Image (cartoon, grey):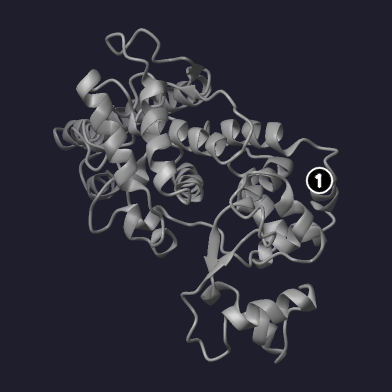
Amino acid sequence: MLQVLAAMATGSSASKAGAASVSGLALVVVAFVLLDAASVSHAQLQVGFYVGKCKGTDVEAVIRGVVQARFKQDPSILPALLRMQFHDCFVRGCDASILLDGQSSEKNAGANASVRGYELIDEIKAALEKACSGVVSCADIIVAATRDAVVLGGGTRYDVQTGRRDGLRSSVNDVNLPGPSIPISNAIGFFNAKKISTEDMVLLLGGHTVGITHCLFISNRLWNFNGSGGPDPSMDPALVRSLRVTCPQNGDGDNNPVNLDQNATSANVVDNSFFKQIMAKRGVLQIDQRLADDGQTRSTVAGLAAGKLDFGKRFGGAMVRMGAIEVLTGSQGEVRKSCRAVNKQSVEATLEEIVDGLLAAQ
């Protein structure tokens, strides 16, 4: 559209006036649509959105059943789904854009290289399409499946709001997620920009109570922190010695897995052990340890570690709030038939084509 407007700058004054009128009207219409969408989208999410909408099928029970079967075979699906929801919601909102296939889709971003669980979402979607085609969105499946996995992993159950619609776009260029060494102030800015509070940021990073990282992402903390030739002084020396065995200096173990929660009896359980570990300087990722060391987050971490703040209940609340980031509802987006592909041409693209056509006719 910008190219059309630029080209018309060399036209007649009448054309310019017509173009200005049409483009101005288009901008006003789009502005009102966007403002209205922003104000109502979160409000349209609700607990039990699909009750009575799937030909008598209990949508959340179907999702729960598939997740339970997978969890029995592979409990690591829990951290996989937590990561999937985070990576989806923090790029263009919780719209399942991470699920779309394509050479330039979000899936192919470096930050998403190790995201997995796509086939589980496909399995759930197939079951729901059989029950009621075109009703349940892929975006809602991600959120509900993640909740069910959290509960199976020992976490406190929380109600999920549903009613999301699926996005129509997925681009590798949209993926801009924080790295494992981001300073706390920068991390707070990143989360706050999505209307996620600092406390909720701490809680969401508490999802590292389960899951793994790889030696590649922590070797600098073990062997040559910031070019010092030694380990990160903020890491417990006993942990340094232990992790150096798993992650040798020559890089041969770059792909070796390392538990994010270093409490061996709790590494696969959703509890507050992660916070106890980072308070003891046993954080594996630099961002995790910084949560305990930075004055902006330390008191929250200490409260969670001591049990003064109930991690189980608060984590569920933070997940719900993350699940409401920039959602599409109502007539926005679509409900995909396949989570890997859009059903139709983007509504936004269609609007631009209509406006461009009107401008070109002047």
Q: Position of residue 307 (x, y in %)?
A: 82, 41
Q: Position of residue 346 (x, y in %)?
A: 24, 35
> Which image quarter: residue 229?
bottom right
Camera-nearest residue between 185 and 47: 47
User: In the image, what residue occupies the spot 68% across and 40% down?
Assistant: 200
Q: Position of residue 37 (x, y in %)?
A: 45, 24
Q: Position of residue 119 (x, y in %)?
A: 29, 46
- Does any portion of residue 95 appear in the rendered image? no
Q: Local crowd at mark 1 within 10 Å, few (<14), some, or many (≥20)?
A: many
Q: Which element type, helix, strand or loop, lies under badge 1?
A: helix
For residue 130, above or below residue 243: above
> Which image quarter: residue 123?
top left
Name the residue that disc number 1 marks: 300
Question: Where's the C terminus, which quadrant?
Answer: top left
Camera-nearest residue between 195 and 237: 237
For residue 33, above or below residue 300: above
* Residue 230 located left or right of residue 296: left
Question: Where's the N terminus, which quadrant?
Answer: top left
Camera-nearest residue between 211 and 219: 211
* Residue 327 located left or right of residue 108: right
User: In the image, what residue occupies the spot 68% across and 78% down?
Assistant: 242
- Does any portion of residue 218 appear in the rendered image? yes
| Type of amino acid at the residue the image marks with label 1 | Thr
Camera-nearest residue between 34 and 184: 184
User: In the image, what residue occupies the spot 56% across and 34% down?
Assistant: 151
User: In the image, what residue occupies the spot 13% across and 33% down?
Assistant: 361
Residue furthest left as drawn: 361
For residue 75, above or below residue 255: above
For residue 184, above or below residue 349: below
